[in-house]
Amino acid sequence: MSDLLSHLIDAIEKADSAASLSDAVQDLADAGLVESIPHLIEALSYNNPGAAVAAVDGLVTLGTPAVPPLLEQLDLNNYTARAWAIRALASIGDPRGLLTLLGAATADISMSVRRAAARGLGSMQWPQFPLQLLEIAQTEALEALLFVAQQDEEWIVRYAAVVGLESLALATQPGSGSRRSQIQKQLERMAHEEESASVKARACKAQQYLREAIPRAEASLRMAQSSLTSTDWEQILARLYNRKLKERTVLSEGDPQHYRELLSVGPLKET
């Protein structure tokens, strides 16, 4: 352990108030040390929102290296820590978090978690997906976002779904007209029928923005090199197929119980 990391951890352990604990975690996050990831994840379970926000920001800044330990965090029974971990995964957008976000957006009991997951589904790191998986993954994200936009009781979550749909439309590859058409129809419906004035206004804004931005987005879409291994992609694809199989054989499409059960799916494991 480096002297700096040891010093920062010692400050957390010696914090004697909520404010000093939050400040100490913020200092740890600001250091940007990969070795700090386990300690930032531990801070998610503190009964201290300020410390948790600082830890999430630090994990998001560190990005990809934080994803496997964050997914491991989802195995634990501490719901508060799980909720913060989902928010971090939503902001990072790593493909390995896709299944977690699908379940969280449609079924989590916390509206703030559903909100974060819905936004995250639209802004996944789509360029990292190989073409053969991109179509499946974006279709799953679209189905989840449509479910949220149409059925979530909280306006702020539906608002996040509009943001997610907008981002997903921009990330959709040229030639995927059906998916983009579904998004445009949903935004049109919300612009006219949505009860919340804020959501209605955001849907109108999304429509206008997409009319101007889609041509530019299609011209600039490029596939970026992914840092994930072939084993990672095999696991992601297997879980997506298992999800669709479960829809067909266990529960009817749209059954709310299906979405609740998604939350019980554990993280990807190394093989």
Image: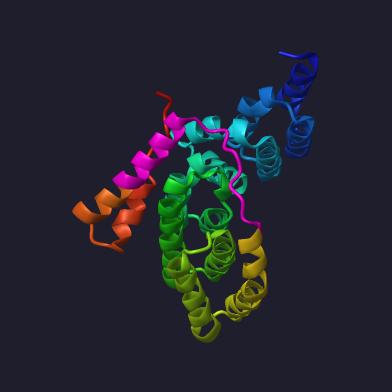
Q: Nearer the viewer, residue 151 or 232?
A: 232
Quarter of the image for residue 26 reads top right
Residue drawn at point x = 68 percent, y = 34 percent? 62
Residue 42 drawn at (x, y percent): 60, 30
The color scheme shown is rainbow
Magenta span has 238?
Answer: yes
Q: Residue at x 59, y 63 (%)?
A: 170
Tell me the magenta residue range.
Answer: 220-242
Return the residue nearer the eye: 19 or 132. 132
Is 48 colored magenta in this rendering?
Answer: no
Q: Is residue 54 left or right of residue 115?
A: right
Q: Position of residue 125 (x, y in %)?
A: 58, 47
Query: Dividing the image into 4 quarters, which one contains the C terminus?
Result: top left
Asked if residue 76 shows in the view, the reply is no
Q: Residue at x 51, y 68 (%)?
A: 154
Q: Is residue 206 left or right of residue 147?
A: right
The answer to whether residue 216 is left or right of residue 172 is right
In the picture, measured across the screen, residue 247 lies left or right of residue 101, that is left
Q: Nearer the viewer, residue 92 or 129?
A: 129
In this picture, is 136 found above or below 2?
Answer: below
Q: Residue at x 49, y 85 (%)?
A: 193
Q: Can the viewer see residue 258 in this picture?
A: yes
**Hey, which quadrant is residue 57 in on the image?**
top right
- In the figure, residue 27 lies in which quadrant? top right
- Number of numbered labels in the structure image: 0
Work out which quarter of the rendered image holds the N terminus and state it.
top right
Q: Is residue 32 above or below residue 79?
A: above
Q: Residue furthest left?
A: 249
